[in-house]
Amino acid sequence: MLTYPSRTSDVLIIGAGPVGLAAALTLRRRGVNVRIVDAAPRGASTSRAAVIHARTLEVLSTIHMATPIVEEGIVVPDFTVRDGTQTLAHLDFRGLQTPYPFTLMLSQARIEEMLAAALAAWGCEVEREVEFDSFAELESTRRAMQLVFRESARHERSFFAADRRPRS
């Protein structure tokens, strides 16, 4: 259990990109108290990725996010790579044994927005401008850790995580 001055969390997730948001949503849907922090002042406004593969959609379906994401994206059942008039590669996804036999084009920024909104609906907001700085095991107990965060690059706050399981 991680204890902070204002709340208690079972899991700390550092980074509110698609993976961190999906992990937080997965845990919240299972009743786990989650704290998710990100150093950025807001979610992505540009995209570092635009294609979602079938397996990712299968995983997103477990948290009921595949359908809304597919509804917003562009289904691409096959893909051709060309150099001028020469075909370098042709990929046909229609034969994949999956409920999602295609790739999907949708901005990473939009996916993050959708995941963050779903997470908020489950009672968990991303804490922005909170940068994880460091952690250290407290030697006196070996059952606690000190976590250090920098908030809004103005000040530093330390929190203690206690009740760690002892090492075997």
Image: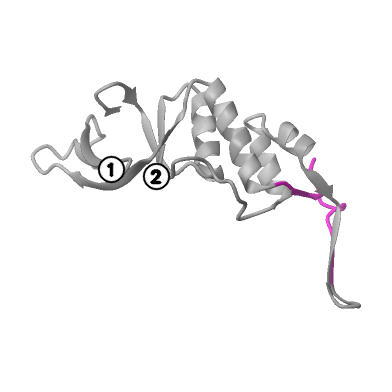
Is residue 101 in view from this perspective?
Answer: no
From the top left corner, tell me how far across and down residue 5 is, in percent: 24, 24
Instruction: Give the numbered dot on residue 150.
Output: 1
Q: Secondary structure at mark 2?
A: loop
Q: Quadrant of residue 160?
A: top left
Task: Identify the residue at horizontal 64%, vertical 32% (top origin).
Answer: 62
Q: For the magenta stretch, what is the residue range?
A: 89-106
Q: Amino acid at mark 1?
A: Arg
Is residue 55 located in the magenta-colored stretch of the structure? no
Quadrant including the C terminus: top left
Task: Identify the residue at horizontal 81%, vertical 46% (top origin).
Answer: 74
Task: Answer left or right for 152 relative to 124.
Answer: left
Q: Mark 1, residues whose alpha carbon is within 10 Å: few (<14), some, or many (≥20)?
A: some
Q: Secondary structure at mark 1?
A: strand
Task: Identify the residue at horizontal 23%, vertical 40% (top origin).
Answer: 155
Task: Answer left or right for 5 relative to 125.
Answer: left
* Labelled pair 1, 2 in contact (Cβ < 8 Å): yes
Is residue 96 located in the magenta-colored stretch of the structure? yes
Q: Mark 2, residues whose alpha carbon is within 10 Å: few (<14), some, or many (≥20)?
A: many
Depth check, front residue: 106 or 91: 106
Task: Identify the residue at horizontal 65%, vertical 41% (top origin).
Answer: 110
From the top left corner, tell me how far across and down residue 72 is, in percent: 76, 37
Residue labelled with disc 2 = 39
